[in-house]
Image (tube, helix red, strand yellow):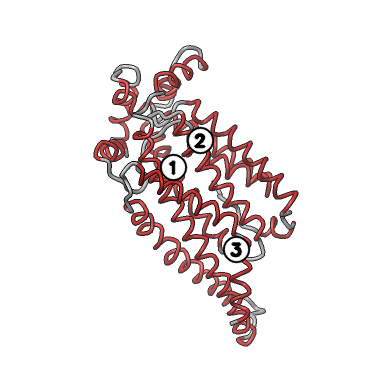
Amino acid sequence: MRAFTTAFCANVKAMAPFHGVVIAYTAAVLLIAASQGALVAASYQQYLANFGPLYFIGLPLVTTITHVLLWCLRSDRPGLRTMVSALPTLSGNIASAVVTLAMLILFMGSFTTFKTLMPVLMDGFPHDRAQADIDAWLHGGMDPGPALLQALDYPFLLNILQWNYMVGWMALAFIPAFFIATRKDASAIRLRYFLTFASVWVVLGSLLACLFLSAGPVFYADVTGDATRFGGQMQVLLERIGPTHRPYLWQSYVNGTIGIGTGISAFPSVHVGVAAMNAFLLWDINRKAGTIGFIYLGIVALSSVLFGWHYAIDGYVSIVVVGLLHVGLKRLFANRLPMPAAAAITSPNPATP
């Protein structure tokens, strides 16, 4: 029992800064929601219903089966007594990982709750025209989205990129968190990863998004009344890949409902921001993996504009801001919580684009 308590308390204490950020952010979101008369639990329930089975059943089951198979293949298998003696410490590590993943689910519920409130706080989406004009000015007087679609108008390619943007990105954004939370002997990189994760979502998806709230090209006609500027791009995409998530997001906004991924905001791009976060972290661990991460970042940034979810400047700003966050947290950890070389080498990649 003492070994369990020691391991559990040590890991929870090591992750205390992340837990503190989540609690403070959630408290702020709930206060804002209460002030708007919109105190609901829908987003928390849905994230628990969807992420709970993934983090607490599916991935643990896959990991356990993998470890058992690898153990059976080992010629130097540890004896039963050794395994039993290590069980309390292992249980403490697992219990602390459950706490970390539960805090991540709480964080995502708070993020979505605030995202759905942003149009209420900002009285709609006031910045689309300005951002679209800046985007066109930076790209020689033309909107980059329609131009990209004209150059890449191949249904097979569009469907691959669309699948990656909607499904592949989700897997690379959230599955690595499980393996980092459950990784032993990597407390410094674990804390750094989760603090970076939270910082990216809060700074990009909450603070900057609320201050410069826009809906993006896909909703440009709805929020500005101008159906011609991006109408051709949206019509071609509708014919090539279908309506995707557009009706779901718009109806959720109109009806004031909350669910997984609801809420509309374009500037800056969290999609690009998370891909940038993974690329920077991968670069610190392994240069080849980092190169792949940056290639993937380019694919995500291109896709965000191609499919009309974002203006190109949304991705540009995200990369710069995430780069600054990465450098700042890296220096903080270098000064206060240096990452052991062994942990950096043996830790799993934050993502494998």
Q: Does the CB distance between marks 3 and 1 fall below 8 Å?
A: no
Q: Of helix, strand and loop, which one carries label 2?
A: helix
**Label 2 sits on residue:** 299
Tell me the CA gap for discs 2 and 1: 9 Å
Residue 51, located in which quarter of the rendered image?
bottom left
**Seen in the image, is 110 located left or right of residue 79?**
left
Q: Residue at x 52, y 61 (%)?
A: 100
Q: Which class describes the residues within 10 Å of circle 2: few (<14), some (14-19), or many (20+)?
A: some
Q: From what the image shows, is residue 236 above or below residue 32?
A: above
Q: Earlier in the sequence, mark 3 or mark 1?
A: 1
User: Residue 96 location in percent, x, y?
Assistant: 55, 67
Q: Residue at x 34, y 17 (%)?
A: 229
Q: Earlier in the sequence, mark 2 or mark 1?
A: 1
**Label 3 sits on residue:** 183
User: Residue 202 location in percent, x, y?
Assistant: 50, 42
Instruction: Name the amino acid type tagged 3.
Output: Arg
Tell me the CA gap for discs 3 and 1: 27 Å
**Seen in the image, is 346 located left or right of residue 216?**
right
User: Residue 59 location in percent, x, y?
Assistant: 46, 63
**Label 1 sits on residue:** 164
**Closer to us: mark 3 or mark 1?**
3
Q: Nearer the viewer, residue 298 or 281?
A: 281
Q: Does the CB distance between marks 2 and 3 fall below 8 Å?
A: no
Q: Does the CB distance between marks 2 and 1 fall below 8 Å?
A: yes
